[in-house]
Amino acid sequence: MADPLPPTGTTATGAVELPALIQGGMGIGVSDWRLAREVGRLGHLGVVSGTALDAVHVRRLGDGDPGGHLRRAYARFPVPGVVERVLERWFVPGGREPTEAYRDVPLGTLDPPAELRELTILANFAEVWLAKEGHDGPIGVNYLEKVQLPTPFAVYGAMLAGVDAVLVGAGIPTQLPRLLDDVAAGAPVSYRVTVAGAGPDTEHTTRLDPAELFGRAAPRLPRPRFLAIVSSVMLATYLTKSEATTPDGFVVEAHDAGGHNAPPRGRLRLDDDGEPIYGPRDDADPAAMTALGLPFWLAGGWARAGAVHEARALGAHGIQVGTAFALCEESALRDDLKAAVVDAALGDELRVRTDPLASPSGFPFKVVDLPGTLADDGVRSERRRVCDLGYLRTPYVRTDGDVGYRCPAGPAAGYVAKGGDADDTTGRVCLCNGLLATIGLGQVRCRGTEPAIVTTGDDAVAVVRALAPLAGPSGRWSAADVVAHLHDRAPAQVG
């Protein structure tokens, strides 16, 4: 098998030719612009996490925008007035006091207020712009299909900044090809939103008209590649049945990847530790994926030396890796949490479990057992349940016919009052607040700051043991070390 494709290049149409290595779009802000920019600078696909970027930026602005990076990117936003309104509402010169709460972000709805639409577009623009600054490598953005309400606004902001690839998982992203086409054309966008209890003939949508943002005809934009994140050949085959739903490629993510996992195929069975039991039907099938005729990248458990070459020998275009990058110097994961994971892994004390209940989305979610985090039953039970971010809320049809919103990780009584099943609240964790705390942006409550929750892949111990010898004075390895390891090269040879 030949060496991997060159890190990056362009096709005859000018679109970016995606490289063999994709850095995973992790958590809320773990893979921020700093990490993505470094990976892109090395010539591989750096990916920013697009989930909850409105809240991430509001909290960075609340801390005074250290280094002025957000305001530097905002200054390049092409629509007058938006930046001024966002800064006036959320920027705190010099930063808030450590005991002061961050300012709230409006909750998303089918018809979000203008300030939320503008904030979402601007935050996604700036995050991608910063990731692309100073190099010509490719940059992608990752979204969750389960978080539908902000999708058209988030995608529009990323495309205004020239994002090269959009990756979407945690659901069946049938609408993304047309969404990218419409946004590229500057056309109005209507994005269907799943609403519990809605009849088969009832369609609920959220809408974006770029002309309203610009006050004139919106410009045409380059269309990024769309990579659907799937767990099986079955879903990939389904997406390719129609030209309207066919992506430009796939990331085939195994169940040992970090974050959200697809549930096992067939009846859900749990082992003695309460974790889902996966079988051969849940394994990736590179030969069947190759037969579909589209490029694909293998993900989940591929952070080993020379993995890029190994995956390409199986017919894949390359691999996607998360955990190794999440623990590297450039990621936004809190330094104390990185150190705790590394120390536990080196001491044979690290446990990563697949929790079938933690995520309000209903998908299994990888949780690292770390004291003081939401993995700790005591910490979880002491936290007062609140839903003030709402990204994983489910829209539902109320008894009066209007659309309401509920989350099983919020107050249980409120969820039941909105027609939810009380059993659905058992074991649920507020990932929105927990993941923001994981990057040092936890909300301040009267009882203290929100606790974090940490997620990695099942191979975290192997990753740490392989990369820890490469760590510098900070005790952490770099993104360049990860790239070199995956290509089985010396760091000086990467990029």
Image (tube, rainbow, N blue to C red):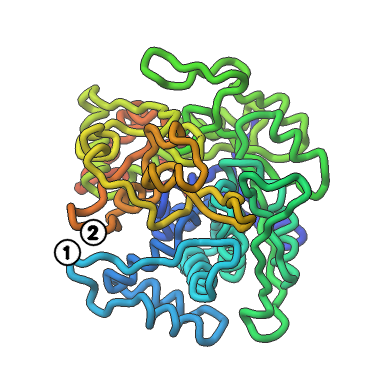
Q: In which quarter of the image is the N terminus?
A: top right
Residue lying at the far top of the rendered structure: 272
Residue drawn 23% across the image and 77% down it: 94
The amino acid sitting under disc 1 is Thr
Q: Nearer the viewer, residue 450 or 3?
A: 450
Q: Nearer the viewer, residue 241 or 149?
A: 149
Image side of residue 304 versus residue 103, left or right: right
Q: Are marks 2 and 1 in contact (CB under 8 Å)?
A: yes
Residue drawn 54% across the image and 48% down it: 394
Image side of residue 450 versus residue 89, left or right: left
Q: How far apart are marks 2 and 1 (CA)?
A: 7 Å
Measuring from the top left, give residue 375's x and y in whole percent.
Answer: 29, 34
Measuring from the top left, give residue 37's x and y in whole percent.
Answer: 45, 59
Residue lying at the far front of the rendered structure: 400
Vertical arrangement, residue 212 with respect to residue 484, above or below: below
Count of marks placed on residues: 2
Residue corresponding to mark 2: 444
Measuring from the top left, give residue 122's x and y in whole percent.
Answer: 50, 72
Dot 1: what SS?
loop
Residue 213 picture quarter: bottom right
Dot 2: what SS?
strand
Residue 312 picture quarter: top right
Measuring from the top left, give residue 477's x and y in whole percent.
Answer: 31, 43
Residue drawn 66% across the image and 75% down it: 210
Residue 267 seen: yes
Residue 129 seen: no
Vertical arrangement, residue 175 with respect to residue 98, above or below: above
Residue corresponding to mark 1: 99
Q: Which of marks 2 and 1 is nearer the N terminus?
A: 1
